[in-house]
Amino acid sequence: MLELYTSEPNTFFLKPLIALHEKKAKFTSRWVDTDTLEHFALDHSREVEARLHLEREGPLLDHDGTLISGSWFMLEYIADTLPGEDLQPAAPFDRYRARASAQFLGAQLGSLVPILGCVKYVTPRLTTNRAALDSRLSTVEPVERRNSWLALVNGTYTPQILDTARERLKFPVSRLEKTLTEGPWLAGPRYSIADIDAFAMLRCLPDLTPELVNSRDTPRIADFLARVEARPAVTAALATSRSGKPGQHFVPGVEPSRWG
Amino acid sequence: MTVHLYHWEPNANSGKPMLTLAEKGVVFESHYTDLLKFDQHQPDYLKVNPDGTIPAMVHGSRVLTESTPMMEYVDDEFPGPPLKPADTKERWRMRWWMRFFDSYFAPSLSMIGWAVFVGPAVRQRPREELEAAIARIPLESRRIAWRKAMFNEFSPEELAESRRRVLFCTGILEEHLGRHEWIAGKTFSLGDINGFNLGYALPLSQPDNCNDAKTPHIMEWLRRIYERPATRQTWKLGRTAMAERVKFLERGHA
């Protein structure tokens, strides 16, 4: 049995959808509405890895009773386990590059993109249903996961915090632009899970930070986004959206570094 | 092709590729890079890794600077006993736990370590020397970390939160090792190498929270890893009292 707990196909939730469609895998979907915190009502207490979601929110893949969590590790799992197109880079050093890229982008884009997306699109939707949100949030553990939602509900992200997030995005964006000068894909000569991982987090940046990611300032990223978006598996993944606007759906994402 | 490894003590991130190479039986050329003397920010080292972080591995024309993906590279590239489970669910669990160690457990533990050990170890030097050292650090995130450590700028709230998380993580790890023999499940793997580098000194640094009575599974797991020949060999490369702490894991020590 292969069942994906999924939501609007954007950021973390988009990654396994693309990989499963690339693999032409047969799977069932279980939709969770993240705006109403439906995912917190699921009981995954039996699995510590699902309970302590490292990205705070995101997809889960139930494969014959084992709950796979962590969107990058889910991509590696899908690549290693399911038949179909080979999505792992072939050479050991290219696999290193894929993992290093995922680690770097997971920490950088994984924390910055969701803040900008949530404040722009999620907070305005959340305010209409405060009592239900408070009730659901009251039992969320660990506490920093609850606090990330409370920050959205309470609107505590100041313009200064958002400016800092935009400023910090320049670093991973410039590194990505530079990496793409070395070749069309992020980890070796062919398309791989490294590209799926990056695409899912980058796709909304031309909307969230048009001054930073655009065809003039970051032509290689713009070209990369267009090339990945044109793949049939990506079209199929995006078509799972119920709202028709997947790029307007976010969850709080990875905790920013506590070192400041 | 010779493997060149730039590393500090067998501890935390430096120890991860050191122990992995030893487990694989890969001979490497060791370049001891003294973190407390800021060797990692010197021009010669920045030619190897412009980010100025350690460890770094050079294998032919390949330069690797992220310690956990570096461990997977060593396992993928070289012959020797496999250090990743053949079962893909175990492999996923190994990777999940390495990220848990790297992104959740280690930052809290290291904040305490930098506040009580790294900061005091460098702080007696003249202020202008420390400021010059900070100015040479390429990455903003590392400049922030070093400034906090050097000038003791950790707030009581930050340190209290780190202590809370270390206690929480220790409990989670104990629960996990109560269910599984090794981090990934039934197989010794990179997950155990990663976790050992993070946690080998927990019984000393957190004696009230990590001990035979409260965390018997962690203690047994650490001792089993300590008894492996590769671990003995690796910790002999340490030059400071930091590496000596591993001897606490001798059976019958306490």
Image (cartoon, rainbow, N blue to C red):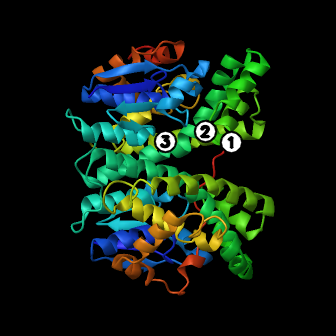
Q: CA distance from mark 2 to mark 1?
A: 8 Å
Does A112 sit above or below residue B225? below
Using the image as rendered, state which of residue B250 and residue A117 is in the foreground. Answer: A117
- Label 2: how many Cα within 10 Å (few below 14, some 14–19, many 20+): many
- Amino acid of disc 1: Glu
Which image quarter holds the N terminus of chain A?
A: bottom left
- Amino acid of disc 3: Phe
Q: CA distance from mark 1 to mark 3?
A: 17 Å
Asked whether the residues under the numbered discs 3 and 2 touch, taking CB atoms below 8 Å apart as contact, a structural biologist would say: no
- Counting residues from the start of the chain, the first of labels 2 and 1 encountered is 2
Q: CA distance from mark 3 to mark 2?
A: 10 Å
Asked if labels 3 and 2 share a chain, the reply is yes
- Counting residues from the start of the chain, the first of labels 1 and 3 encountered is 3
Q: Which residue is mark 1?
A: B161
Mark nearer the viewer, 2 or 1: 2
Measuring 51% from the left and 78% from the top, which residue is drawn there? A8
Residue A160 appears in which quarter of the rendering? bottom right
Using the image as rendered, state which of residue A107 and residue A223 is in the foreground. Answer: A223
Q: Dot 1: what SS?
A: helix
* Residue A34 picture location, percent across and down: 57, 74
- Label 1: how many Cα within 10 Å (few below 14, some 14–19, many 20+): some
Q: Which residue is mark 2?
A: B108
Does B183 sit above or below residue B89? above
Q: Dot 3: what SS?
A: helix
Question: Count the marks: how many?
Answer: 3
Chain identity of mark 2: B
* Residue A105 picture location, percent across and down: 51, 54
Q: Which residue is mark 3?
A: B101
